[in-house]
Image (spheres, helix red, strand yellow):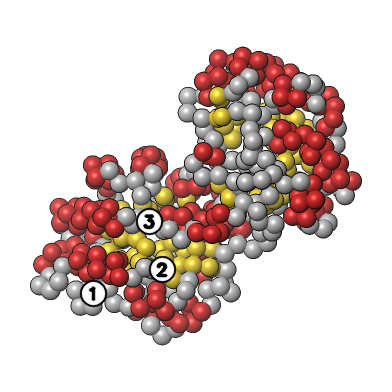
């Protein structure tokens, strides 16, 4: 288990063009300064040109530990590639990808109907050839799509592609939803900082964090406030800041989440993903992951896919004791965090004795305490536990349905019909012992959120909060 609490997270620029001539005079300096600028890794994308093939990209990724590469024929160059008298560019991509282990993706490829430098039918042909090659090599696909939403999605569906990135996403909400259904990641560039990008910011607000990447597409698309200057990987921080603002997170949260997403997709996650955290930071709250055991098996729970919450890997192979948790928390938590939250990849009140002992110690230090719970602790322990939780400042209870019938549809619980009434009792009883009680529901498609609100606010008299589907914490 990892006994560190993150204090700094490095960004991953998931799409750059560091081979561009605009970097010729200071390329080495730009790359050398990445870490100091808060950028850990960069995926630099090489696009074929008739005069030079893939240029220096293979050389760059082998020279620098923090660079990885992708190779493709940009849709602008599809016609030139078709008419080229030398070697087939697709064969060169295949050869380099097999030879160079740091070539970790195929593309960029796709469709661009804005300029139409190449006829659409030729663009489509090369798009499908890239898809076939990515499938053959088991590498993710990087897709460029501009003013070609319908055809891009149609081809991806026809070809059955589910492993890739829609880079520099510029489509509409419908395209975003279709891409997410296919399993694609949406990568957002500095365009999200532009004044006229309100629709794109709305898409960011609705994109699940576990399907989001950030990029510069440098030297293009320089973000505000650096407009007019050459874009470079260090400027991905401005995109991260804007996304943090939209999502109500910190830049560290966005860096951690998107870096983990990129590393996982590109096959780079390795050991860092396997180190389970007992304590993990989101915004300025410290969350405690004290058990992976759970009362229920929720249909929407991401645990059964990844055990990852906002970029933190939380699968425990043994449960920590009091001393282990205190060690991870470290000194003076009341000065470093706004609150301590019992919330991991399990139901914290299953370990109520640890919650009480640890919670009281933290409360005496001056910490604010929150518990996120399924509200079933009374049934699990065979007693009313709320009087024992008097030290808690806030308790957030997962209501998740407007009635018992709907609850049983989305929550698989061994407690059966007794579960939902127990949650309602728990909420009412919590009001007697805890200053702030909140009922929540995950916005699972088909669940009546208004009905949940009526139960919480009108019938029980506690505030109600909707939690975004596919996001936890």
Report the disc number at residue 112. none
* Cα separation between marks 2 and 1: 18 Å
Residue denoted by label 3: 167
Q: Nearer the viewer, mark 2 or mark 1?
A: 2
Residue lying furthest front in this view? 318
Callout 3 touching callout 2 (CB < 8 Å): no
* Cα separation between marks 3 and 2: 16 Å
For the residue pair 439 and 40, the one nearer the viewer reads as: 40
Quadrant in which the C terminus is drawn = top right
For the residue pair 347 and 210, the one nearer the viewer reads as: 347
Residue denoted by label 2: 68
Rendered image quadrant of residue 398: top right
Disc 1 is placed on an element classified as loop
Disc 3 is placed on an element classified as loop
Q: Residue at the location (76% across, 51% down)?
A: 324
x then y, percent, for residue 163: 36, 49
* Cα separation between marks 1 and 3: 22 Å
Determine whether 116 is above or below 282 in the image.
Answer: below
Please indicate whether residue 472 sits to the left or right of residue 195 in the image: right
- Disc on the earlier residue, 3 or 2: 2
Q: Residue at the location (67% across, 34% down)?
A: 347
Rendered image quadrant of residue 433: top right
Residue denoted by label 1: 53
Determine whether 16 is above or below 387 in the image.
Answer: below
x then y, percent, for residue 446: 48, 24
Disc 2 is placed on an element classified as strand
Q: Nearer the viewer, mark 1 or mark 3?
A: 1
x then y, percent, for residue 212: 47, 51
Determine whether 454 is above or below 228 in the image.
Answer: above
- Disc on the earlier residue, 1 or 3: 1
| 10 Å crowding of disc 2: few (<14), some (14-19), many (20+) | many
Determine whether 155 is above or below 400 in the image.
Answer: below
């Amino acid at each position: 288990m990892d006994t560190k609490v993150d204090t700094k997270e490095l960004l991953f620029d998931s799409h750059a063009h560091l081979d561009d001539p605009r970097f010729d005079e200071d390329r080495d300096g730009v790359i050398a300064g990445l870490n100091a600028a808060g950028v850990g890794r960069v995926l630099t994308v090489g696009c074929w040109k008739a005069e030079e093939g893939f240029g220096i990209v293979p050389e760059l990724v082998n020279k620098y530990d923090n660079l990885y590469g992708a190779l493709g024929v940009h849709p602008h160059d599809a016609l030139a590639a078709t008419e080229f008298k030398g070697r087939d560019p697709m064969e060169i991509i295949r050869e380099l990808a097999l030879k160079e282990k740091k070539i970790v993706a195929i593309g960029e490829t796709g469709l661009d109907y804005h300029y139409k430098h190449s006829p659409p039918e030729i663009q489509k042909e090369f798009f499908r050839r890239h898809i076939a090659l990515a499938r053959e090599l088991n590498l993710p696909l990087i897709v460029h799509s501009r003013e070609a939403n319908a055809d891009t999605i149609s081809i991806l569906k026809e070809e059955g592609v589910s492993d890739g990135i829609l880079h520099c996403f510029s489509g509409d909400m419908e395209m975003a939803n279709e891409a997410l259904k296919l399993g694609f990641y949406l990568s957002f560039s500095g365009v999200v900082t532009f004044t006229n990008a309100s629709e794109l910011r709305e898409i960011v607000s609705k994109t699940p964090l576990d399907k989001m990447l950030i990029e510069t597409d440098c030297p293009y698309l320089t973000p505000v406030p650096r407009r007019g200057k050459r874009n470079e990987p260090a400027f991905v921080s401005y995109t991260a800041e804007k996304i943090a603002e939209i999502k109500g997170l910190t830049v560290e949260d966005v860096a951690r989440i998107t870096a983990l997403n990129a590393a996982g997709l590109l096959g780079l996650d390795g050991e860092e993903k396997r180190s389970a955290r007992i304590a993990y930071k989101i915004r300025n709250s410290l969350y405690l992951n004290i058990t992976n055991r759970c009362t229920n098996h929720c249909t929407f729970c991401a645990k059964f896919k990844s055990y990852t919450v906002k970029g933190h890997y939380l699968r425990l192979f043994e449960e920590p004791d009091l001393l282990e948790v205190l060690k991870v928390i470290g000194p003076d938590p009341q000065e470093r965090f706004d609150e301590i939250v019992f919330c991991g990849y399990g139901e914290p009140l299953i370990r109520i004795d640890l919650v009480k002992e640890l919670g009281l110690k933290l409360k005496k230090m001056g910490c604010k305490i929150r518990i996120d719970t399924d509200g079933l602790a009374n049934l699990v322990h065979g007693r009313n536990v709320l009087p024992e939780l008097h030290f808690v400042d806030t308790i957030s209870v997962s209501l998740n349905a407007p009635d018992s019938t709907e609850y049983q549809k989305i929550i698989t619980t061994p407690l059966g019909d007794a579960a939902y009434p127990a949650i309602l009792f728990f909420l009412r009883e919590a009001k007697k012992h805890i200053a702030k009680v909140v009922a929540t529901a995950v916005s699972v498609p088909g669940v009546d959120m208004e009905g949940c609100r009526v139960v919480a606010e009108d019938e029980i008299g506690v505030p109600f909060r909707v939690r975004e589907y596919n996001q936890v914490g």
